């Protein structure tokens, strides 16, 4: 049964800061990004990604194996063993249905001869309604992905632009301390993709990629469709928007200092009391922001240094995040390819 959980997700903070900073196509980090990643961390912590779905899982032994496994490694091993037991007829049927998607693989630099189908997910809609909400689904838990391609045509309908749709990948499904990567595309600030690394339930790294401008076909409007594709090879994740490569992420890359707002210029006429008061106010605000950004950066450095950021394999699921109001994400033509 799908669950709707009220959670602390403050995407609005990130989007408003991105707009205010006018990042353009540089993809530069902002001071508010870590605050947003921390909020997402709190939102997802305690939630098992792989507990979603359940409507169309044709591999009951996999669910049993997962239920009996107590350690995250046992969960993944049991699932892969159950997957290997699928009969040849089922594999052949999957390969036939997958044929139309094989033609897309070269677009993402993937050799169709070096891999096999993972799954084709039926069309599914995730809907959340309310303040700070989150939902997720994966109807086929039998597949554990190491190197992979996952793609979906995502249609969103939201009250606010601060909603997000996307994937979790290489998730271990440990509801007490999730290890996984999240890739979320959002309408806010004309369109961004957020990549987040979650280790033991906490966000320990992330990168913001500006979709609008890099992808000439990206549409940040409401009730529109964009294709999100993620290619994971080792520690490199390539993000495609409507088949256009918009960025690459390596979770092991050292944390970099986000951009700090420039110091305001003093007025030419220092004798103008009104202008000087405004300048002092702006200077105090800039110093406060710079101090907070530096503190967040140092905190991220410590967290990154003491956390595991390399997850070699795991489950894949679709997610919706919402800051407020009703948010609907429909996933069509969703498929997973396993690179070998």
Image: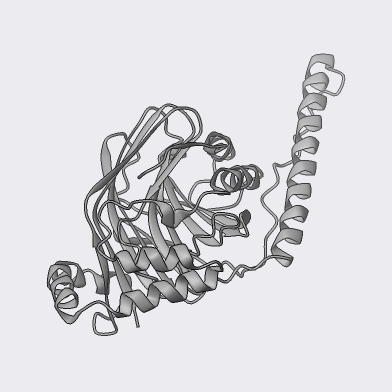
How many labels, in total?
Answer: 0
Picture quarter containing residue 141? Answer: bottom left
On the image, the x and y values in percent for residue 242 come to 29, 55
Residue at image point 34% right, 75% down: 82
User: From the viewer's perspective, is 5 left or right of 301?
Assistant: left
In this picture, residue 90 sits left or right of residue 266: left
Residue 236 seen in this snapshot: no
User: Residue most toward the top?
Assistant: 274
Q: Is residue 262 visible?
A: yes
Colour mode of the rendering: one colour
> Quick one: 126 or 65, which is closer to the camera?
65
Front residue (pair 271, 274): 274
**Is 165 left, or right, of 195 in this rendering?**
left
**The N terminus is located in which quarter?**
top left
12 displayed left or right of 263: left
Quadrant where the image shows the C terminus: bottom left
User: Where residue 122 sits in the image (x, y, percent)?
Assistant: 21, 54
The structure residue drawn at horizontal position 25% and vertical position 76%, both measured from the top left corner, is: 86
Query: Where is residue 230 shown, x and y percent of the image?
Result: 38, 63
Q: Residue at x 61, y 55 (%)?
A: 201
> Where's residue 162, x and y in %?
46, 35
Where on the picture, by quarter, is residue 191? Answer: top left
Residue located at (43% from left, 74% from top): 78
Q: Nearer the viewer, residue 125 or 75?
A: 75
The foreground one among 213 and 306 is: 306
Residue that lies at the very extreme toward the right in this rendered image = 271
């Amino acid at each position: 049964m799908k669950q709707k959980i009220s959670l602390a997700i403050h995407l609005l903070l990130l989007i408003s800061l991105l707009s205010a900073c006018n990042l353009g196509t540089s993809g530069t980090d902002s001071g508010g990004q870590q605050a947003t990643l921390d909020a997402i961390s709190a939102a997802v912590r305690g939630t098992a990604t792989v507990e979603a779905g359940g409507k169309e899982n044709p591999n009951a032994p996999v669910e049993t194996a997962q239920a009996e496994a107590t350690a995250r490694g046992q969960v993944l091993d049991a699932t892969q063993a159950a997957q290997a037991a699928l009969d040849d007829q089922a594999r052949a049927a999957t390969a036939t249905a997958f044929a139309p998607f094989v033609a897309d693989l070269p677009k993402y630099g993937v050799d169709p001869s070096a891999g096999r189908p993972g799954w084709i997910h039926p069309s599914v809609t995730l809907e959340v309604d309310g303040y700070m909400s989150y939902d997720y689904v994966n109807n086929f838990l039998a597949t554990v992905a190491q190197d992979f391609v996952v793609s979906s045509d995502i249609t969103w309908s939201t009250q606010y632009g601060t909603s997000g749709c996307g994937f979790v990948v290489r998730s271990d499904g440990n509801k007490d301390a999730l290890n996984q990567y999240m890739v979320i595309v959002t309408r806010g600030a004309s369109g961004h993709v957020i990549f987040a690394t979650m280790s033991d339930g906490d966000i320990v790294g992330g990168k913001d990629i500006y979709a609008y401008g890099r992808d000439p076909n990206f549409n940040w409007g409401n009730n529109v469709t964009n294709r999100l594709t993620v290619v994971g090879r080792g520690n490199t994740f390539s993000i495609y928007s409507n088949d256009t490569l918009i960025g690459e992420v390596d979770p092991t890359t050292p944390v970099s200092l986000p951009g700090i707002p420039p110091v305001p210029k003093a007025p030419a006429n220092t004798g103008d009391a009104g202008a000087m008061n405004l300048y002092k106010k702006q200077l105090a605000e800039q110093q406060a922001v710079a101090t907070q950004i530096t503190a967040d950066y140092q905190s991220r450095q410590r967290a990154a240094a003491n956390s595991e950021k390399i997850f070699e394999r795991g489950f894949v699921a679709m997610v919706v995040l919402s800051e407020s109001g009703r948010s609907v994400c429909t996933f069509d033509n969703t498929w997973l390819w396993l690179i070998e």
